[in-house]
Image (cartoon, rainbow, N blue to C red):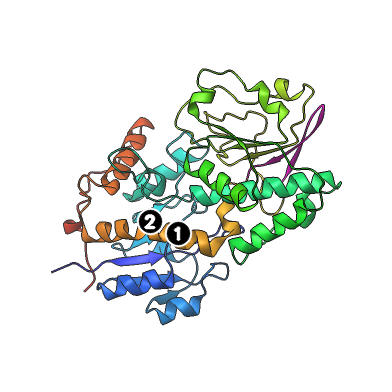
Amino acid sequence: MPQKRLVWLRHETKPFEERTALSPDGVRRLISKGHQVVVESSPARCFNDADYRAAGAELVLPDSWSSAPFQAIILGLKEVEKNTFPMPHRHIYFGHAYKQQEGAADLLNRFVLGDGRLFDFEFLTDHAGMRVCAFGIWSGFVGTGLALKEWALKKQGQCLNQEAPLRPYSDSENFIFDVKNELERVAEQPKILIIGARGRCGRGAQKFLEALKLKATLYSSADTLNRNTLPEALEYDIVINAVLLKGAIPPFLTPELLARERKLSVVVDISCDPNGPHNPLPIYNKETSFQRPVHKLNFGSELSLIAIDHLPSLLPRESSSDFESQFFPHLLEFLSGEIEDSPWERSLERFYQTVLELGLSFRDRPIEFETQPTIN
């Protein structure tokens, strides 16, 4: 007989984050399979509380997951707020803790102290090492749209910051229409370079350009291999960095390079890891946000930099629905307890590996699902 699980969807606390990994329809499907779903009320989530309640979920207060029953599987999307209390549950979300990011050791130590486990979305991979669920297409799509809009606004003596805080669009058609209108106020078309064009983010960037019938120069890893900076990037109006960061690579742009005479006026860093050890754009050290989407950098002449680490939030419903369609079959696999030789096992292995690398240790509690309590 299939075991019932308790899935606890938490409220997202990151500012301007409206996405979710589980929609009301997803709740309905889980309940139809005998699982229990608790949803934290959220004024920001792109699906409203009433729809979750109608789907059969139990609604609870925001940020109450820390007191959830031990057997609850805590499902989120972005990082939890910084704190020090131990984390005893199994959590599923983007932890940003396995690439030497700032605060990673403190976060993982909370799992160690609580004997909990982190299943990071980013490391749910297939046998070939490819992620099974990602927002990359939407990151590239939105980042490219914002870069085009900032370029057009600059041509008119304006800036995207003047429209901040940026608010989500109802759908991608309205977003495309908005950017198209801004571009039509400018007599020329931008010259665009996409670095990392073959990956998810790069394909998303191309998808947006295709909607406006714009062309770009496409760089793959073969075009940047063994290169020390890309001086030809200065000849473009817009550079889109869509590279998947897996290890150390030489910088594409440096302050010294940008101090030269250049046409380049807008850079969007979709990879957005300014404080990581493998940042290929060492020209800034802090992300931008929907509150202030553009950094104005001065390297002799002004450069607009966009580096928002949750770009798909500008299209929360579409990006959430797409992500859920990728993730949901794997969630069912997880709830069934069939994690051997699966993306879940590979994500868990990365958790253990990083904990050991940091010199942390936890008591040996079996993670097999059959040893875990289930719902009565």
| Quadrant in which the N terminus is drawn | bottom left
Which secondary structure lies at badge 1? helix
Q: Return the residue at label 1.
A: 322
- Give the percent coordinates (x, y) of residue 305: 70, 39
Measured in 3D between alpha carbons, the distance from the residue under mark 2 to the one under mark 1, in whole angstroms, is 7 Å
Label disc, if present, on residue 326 of the rendered structure? 2
Name the one closer to the observer, 31 or 170: 170
Please indicate whether residue 373 sits to the left or right of residue 60 in the image. left
Residue at x 43% of width, y 68% of height? 23
Contact (Cβ within 8 Å) of mark 2 with mark 1? yes
Q: Say which quarter of the image contains residue 337.
A: bottom left
Please indicate whether residue 257 sits to the left or right of residue 195 in the image. right
Q: Within the magenta stretch, is there residue 187?
A: no
- Give the percent coordinates (x, y) of residue 270: 58, 42
Residue at x 25% of width, y 57% of height? 333
Q: Say which quarter of the image contains residue 9.
A: bottom left
**Residue span colored magenta:** 294-307
Q: Which residue reaches farthest right?
A: 157
